Image: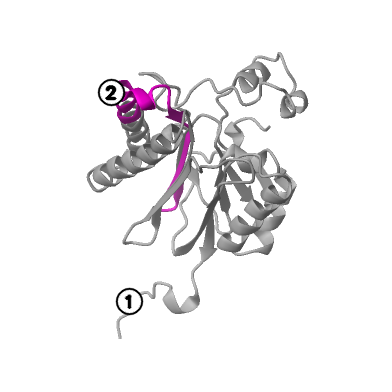
Amino acid sequence: MKPFWKQFISPPQASAISDYAIEIGSFSDVGRTRSINQDQLGYVRFANDQTVLTMVADGMGGHRAGEVASQVAVATFQRLFVGQFPDRNDYREILVNSTIAANREIYQLAQESPEYQGMGTTLVALAIINGYAYYTNTGDSRLYCLRNNDYRQLSEDHTLVADMVNKGLLTAAAAENHPDKHIITSALGTHGKLKISCPNQPLAIEMGDYFLLCSDGLYDLVNDDEMRQSLVTNSAQQACEQLVGLANARGGLDNISVLIVKILAKPISVRRVPITRA
């Protein structure tokens, strides 16, 4: 388990790249031991093709309640983000506001419906906007980034074990197999308030950056090196399917969801051509 890496965040003055292409792959599977898939994936491509919103939510709760929570989280977040996006440019605030709205929606639904009481969901979201990556998370679904063969976790786990590591009470190595590693300290819908990790500054993307969002059903059974290798040797969609297959081959102990975003150079034929005068 890697901590949140502040030194990986580009400074505010970092220049944004342009004329990049975005390749997306996604795959979600129920796994080998569960009867219901309570994970939910979501993504939206914007018209300019330089902007995309991606999300992974991992629901929890009684019969189908977790499935409802993750679906509501993704749908509400997406609706609020898209609704605010054209009129504002504080994208970090849009991410935070969308998370708060999703939390409120799930919490109210749980209070009104006895069958949904106690339901909740994790949520990790990544938005690529005009050359910058903005991201947020609540819970233990993760966001990773591969840059120049350096693969690291950008999201911050909200778990009891992660808190112990941050306080120096437990080593990162010991945390990997700790029996309480999946006790979540914050999730959407379980309380009126929640913890949101959202960096103050965005990450200036670079050509060749690969981002991977996933639920714990993947990273519990597939290690960082295996994720990195799959990213560099496959298309985004093929990597998603390969990684889910690998987790299932090792038992598929939970629902498994993966969403991959690759930042690639545009083919020469579709790059912007400057206007010249005779």
Above or below 236: residue 127? above
> Most extreme residue toward the left, as rendered?
87
Secondary element at tag 1: loop
Label 2 or label 1, whichever comes before in sequence order: 2
Please tell me how crowded label 1 is: few (under 14), some (14-19), or many (20+) other residues with Cα within 10 Å.
Answer: few
Q: Relative to residue 232, is residue 124 drawn left or right? A: left
Taking depth in this image into account, of 46 and 50 the one nearest to the observer is: 46
Estimate the x, y position of residue 262 in percent, counting from the top left.
54, 58
The amino acid beneath tag 2 is Glu
Answer with left or right where residue 251 lies relative to residue 25.
Answer: right
Give the left or right position of residue 176, taking residue 90 as reference.
Answer: right
Residue occupying the far bottom of the picture:
278
Query: For residue 220: magenta?
Result: no
- Residue on which the image places disc 1: 275
Query: Is residue 129 at all visible to an observer of this figure?
Result: no
Specify whether residue 113 is painted magenta.
Answer: yes
* Residues drawn in magenta: 105-132
**Residue appearing at x 63%, y 52% in the figure:** 244
The residue positioned 54% from the left and 38% from the top of the image is 9
At label 1, which amino acid type do we have?
Ile
Query: Residue most toward the right?
Result: 173
Locate the N terminus and report the quarter of the image it occupies: top right
- Residue identifier under label 2: 112
The answer to which of 2 and 111 lies nearer the viewer is 111
**Nearest to viewer (mark 2 / mark 1):** 2
Q: Secondary structure at mark 2?
A: helix
Q: Residue at x 72, y 23 (%)?
A: 178
Residue in the image at 61% along x and 33% along y:
5
Query: At which x and y percent is residue 192?
Result: 35, 18
Residue 146: image location, x then y, percent: 63, 49
Q: Relative to 198, is 249 on the left or the right?
A: right
